[in-house]
């Protein structure tokens, strides 16, 4: 079973930075899970943002490459999303998600709101 809790969102001006955190409660060692960040803007479908696998390989959506960095701390069962050079179009609710093997968990957290505006 997987349970995740996201935090760290807030309001920031364009060009600013935020760091999101996601703490996971999982039934297997956290290090064995691939972790991903997704986001959903108002009126739009949820979309992929970034992923980090069990050996630290990362991948990003084109829209955030070079600005966002995903990382993990297995001792804290936490995955982070460092977001720099934020743009208004980054405004969304951000969610994290866990994958064990080839199966992504259907248990989404409550998300954390990120608002980028002047």
Image (cartoon, grey):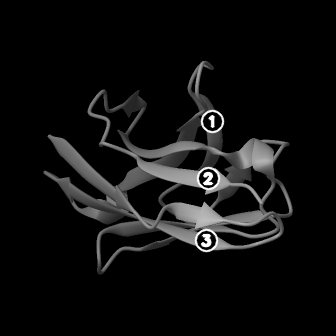
Q: What is the crowding at mark 2: few (fewer than 14 residues within 10 Å), some, or many (at least 20)?
A: many
Residue 7's x, y, as percent? 38, 63
Residue 18 marker: 3
Q: Is residue 37 above or below residue 103?
A: below
Splitting the image into 4 quarters, where does residue 45 fall?
top right
Q: CA distance from mark 3 to mark 2?
A: 10 Å
Mark 3 or mark 2: whose residue is earlier in sequence? 3
Ranked by sequence position, the earlier of labels 3 and 1 is: 3
Task: Give 88 or 65, whichever is nearer the viewer.
Answer: 88
Q: Secondary structure at mark 2?
A: strand
SS of the residue under disc 1? strand
Nearest to the observer: residue 32 or residue 41? 41
Is the residue under label 1 in contact with that under label 3 (CB below 8 Å)?
no
Left or right side of 80 for 16: right
Name the front one of labels 1 and 2: 2
**Residue 94 % position (x, y):** 51, 46
Which residue is identified by label 2? 115
Q: Is residue 65 visible?
A: yes
Say which quadrant the N terminus sits in: top left
Q: Which mark is residue 48?
A: 1
Q: Is residue 4 left or right of residue 27?
A: right
Q: Residue at x 23, y 62 (%)?
A: 29
The quadrant of the rendering that contains the C terminus is bottom right
Residue 52 can be seen in this image: no
Residues packed near mark 3 inside 10 Å, few (<14), some (14 to 19) or many (20 plus): some
User: Residue 98: which quarter of the image?
Assistant: top left
**Camera-side mark, 3 or 1:** 3
Helix, strand or loop status at disc 3:
strand
- At a point 83% along the width and 55% down the height, the residue shown is 65
Taking depth in this image into account, of 91 and 103 the one nearest to the observer is: 91
């Amino acid at each position: 079973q997987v349970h995740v809790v996201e935090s760290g969102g807030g309001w920031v001006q364009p060009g600013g930075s935020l760091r999101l955190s996601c703490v996971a409660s999982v039934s297997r060692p956290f290090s064995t899970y691939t972790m991903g960040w997704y986001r959903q803007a108002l009126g739009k479908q949820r979309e992929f943002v970034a992923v980090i696998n069990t050996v630290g390989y990362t991948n990003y959506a084109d829209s955030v490459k070079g600005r966002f960095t995903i990382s993990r701390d297995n001792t804290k069962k936490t995955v982070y999303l460092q977001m720099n050079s934020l743009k208004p179009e980054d405004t969304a609710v951000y969610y994290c998600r866990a994958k064990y093997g080839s199966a992504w968990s259907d248990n989404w957290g409550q998300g954390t709101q990120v608002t980028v505006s002047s």
